[in-house]
């Protein structure tokens, strides 16, 4: 449900955006917010820094959820 993902696994547009905002994380964390919406960011110990909100599950698209 909520888990780490390799930054290499997200869509090309998201990878380009990470470079644009100077975030070079090897791993991103995603929270599933029910249905398709996802919250993406970086997790450090007890802190979560939001990088983007993905209401349509387009950062890492898969079949119908």
Image (cartoon, helix red, strand yellow):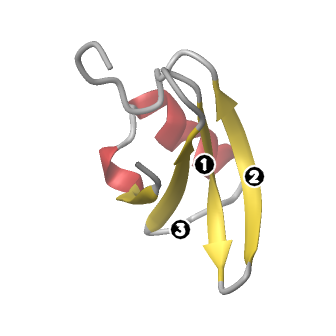
Residue 8: where, in percent of width, then height? 33, 52
The CA distance from mark 3 to mark 2 is: 13 Å
Query: What is the x, y in percent for residue 61?
Result: 34, 24
> Which residue lies under the disc numbered 2?
50
Instruction: Examine the rendered structure and indicate whether residue 17 appears above or below residue 57.
Output: below
- Of circles 2 and 1, which is in front? 2
Q: Position of residue 51 (x, y in %)?
A: 71, 48
To which residue does mark 1 refer? Answer: 18
Give the mark nearer the N terminus: 3 vs 2: 3
Q: Are marks 2 and 1 in contact (CB under 8 Å)?
A: no
Q: Could you classify mark 1 by the number of other residues whose Cα lies within 10 Å: few (under 14), some (14-19), or many (20 or more)?
A: some
Position of residue 31 in the picture relative to residue 47 (left or right): left
Structural distance between the alpha carbons of marks 3 and 1: 8 Å
Image point 54% across, 29% down: which residue? 34
Q: Position of residue 32 (x, y in %)?
A: 52, 40
Q: To which residue does mark 3 refer?
A: 25
Q: Residues within 10 Å of mark 3 (few under 14, many from 20)?
A: few
The answer to which image quadrant residue 33 occupies is top right
Helix, strand or loop at label 2? It is strand
Nearer-the-camera pick, 34 or 63: 34
């Amino acid at each position: 449900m909520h888990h780490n993902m390799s930054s290499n696994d997200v869509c090309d547009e998201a990878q380009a955006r990470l470079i644009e905002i100077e975030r070079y994380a090897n791993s991103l964390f995603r929270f599933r917010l029910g249905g398709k919406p996802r919250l993406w960011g970086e997790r450090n110990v007890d802190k979560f820094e939001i990088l983007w909100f993905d209401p349509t599950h387009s950062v890492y698209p898969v079949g119908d959820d």
